[in-house]
Image (cartoon, grey):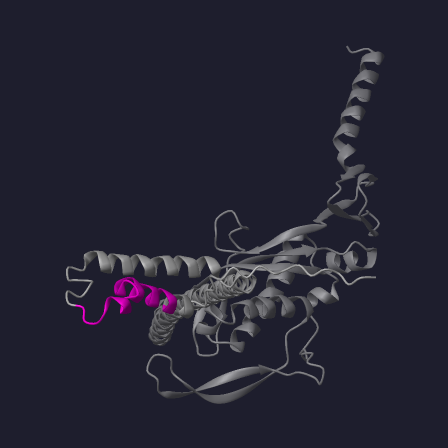
Amino acid sequence: MPTFKQVIGVILLVIVLACVALLGKVCEYVGAGQICVMQYPNGTLRVFSTPGWKLQWFGDVEKYKKSYQFWFSSKDGQGADAEKEIKCRFNEGGHADISGSARVDMPQDQESMLVIHTKYGSQLAVEHELLRTSVERAVYMSGPLMSSQESSAEKRPLLLTYIEDQAANGVYSTTVKDMKIDDPITGEKKTVSVVEIKMDDKGVPFRQETSPLQQFKLRLYGLSINDVKYDPTVEKQIAQQQQAKMSVQIAIANAKRAEQDALTAVKEGEANAAKAKWLQEVEKATEVTKAEKEAAVAKINAERDVMVAELALKAAEQTKMKDIALGEGESTRMKLVMQANGALELKLKTYEKVNEMYASALGNFRGSLVPTVMMGGAGNATGNSAMSFIDLLTAKAAKDLALDFSMNVPVPVAPPAK
């Protein structure tokens, strides 16, 4: 039989095991990124958003993430299977499956969290029943604002903006208008219904209703679209439209290229003409410079010749003046000499020359200087006739030379008596 102590030990062990088993109902740990909503046994609800251990007192606990990524993507690893892409319908009737994600922040105040917990009860219900529904509605209302082609090209950024704005703040109030447009494939006119957003005077869109996310104070932001899968028909149509636009763009590009080539050719022609013109100008300038150089050289040579001629003329004038001066000097000298001696030396030389010529003439004469027959008495012969003739010629030469052979010695005159 067990003893009393053994019974007490067993009881205490059972109590300890029960306490350990019930410890998870007594305390609950709240993480830094969690919001904890506790419902106590008496029905009281309390929200804990600060991290640490919290007393549970055997109440029920539901945890929410403070911030998380909401997925609506078809790619593996991006959300659960239930969080797949959202279908969108565009204004021309085309369909597409849109994949993406957005960041969501949960409210942390008691009132908002209690309302969310009371209405949805769990994180998963908030994501599927609140977030996905709001994003689906935003996608559904954004599709009619553009065509499939526009959503794949020029209005692709607007598609992202429309979805995020309507999911976070409420769907737009819109109006539908029928418009005729040119079909990008056939080129024919067709009528399409175009949805336009109603705007106030300041350009702010009117809203049909406030977004449920705004009502529950959930913040949705950072929406991104990672894929848009169009229906095969739409894909084919978009490809045809893109091909048509590409052909137009190519044609425009070719036209612009041809225009540019023409302009280039014109510019090249102008450049070549300008180059040829400038080459001619260079050649002209070279020839002008050469001619100017030759003219300058000729001018310098002419000026040099003029200077040489002037110097020669001046030299000739100087020579002339020198010769004149020498002549005048010699003339004056001779004049003075003649005035001094009557050119006696020259006259004597001339006189001597004349006598030499007479003597030579008489010496070379072969005839008879004395007549062979003399008529008359001897008393009439007073001398030699030849000698007389010579004396005559000598006297004549002396007269012609103004020579005076008389010895006219001045007789001194005695001074008068005192």
For the point 56% across and 63% down, which residue is it?
Answer: 336
Q: Residue at x 38, y 69 (%)?
A: 291
Q: Is residue 360 left or right of residue 292?
A: left
Q: Is residue 13 left or right of residue 198?
A: right
Kindly identify the residue that appears in the image at 64 percent across and 68 percent down.
165
Magenta span covers which residues? Answer: 374-396
The image quarter in which residue 376 lies: bottom left
Relative height, residue 8 to residue 319 (above, below) = above
- Front residue (pair 384, 171): 384
Could you say which is closer to the camera, residue 340 or residue 229?
Answer: 340
Residue 226, image x, y percentages: 51, 57
Q: Is residue 178 above or below residue 116?
A: below
Q: Nearer the viewer, residue 347 or 75?
A: 347
Answer left or right for 87 relative to 236: right
Q: Where's the N terminus, which quadrant?
A: top right
The quadrant of the picture occupied by the C terminus is: bottom right
Q: Is residue 110 left or right of residue 82?
A: right
Secondary structure of the magenta portion, mostly?
A: helix
Whether 35 is drawn above or below 369: the answer is: above
Magenta span contains residue 283: no
Q: Examine the image and state in which quarter residue 389 appears.
A: bottom left
Q: Nearer the viewer, residue 398 or 226?
A: 398
Give how far across and how far down residue 404 sits, in percent.
Answer: 47, 64
How far across and down, in percent of the image, does residue 350 sit?
38, 60
Q: Is residue 353 visible?
A: yes
Is residue 395 highlighted in magenta?
yes
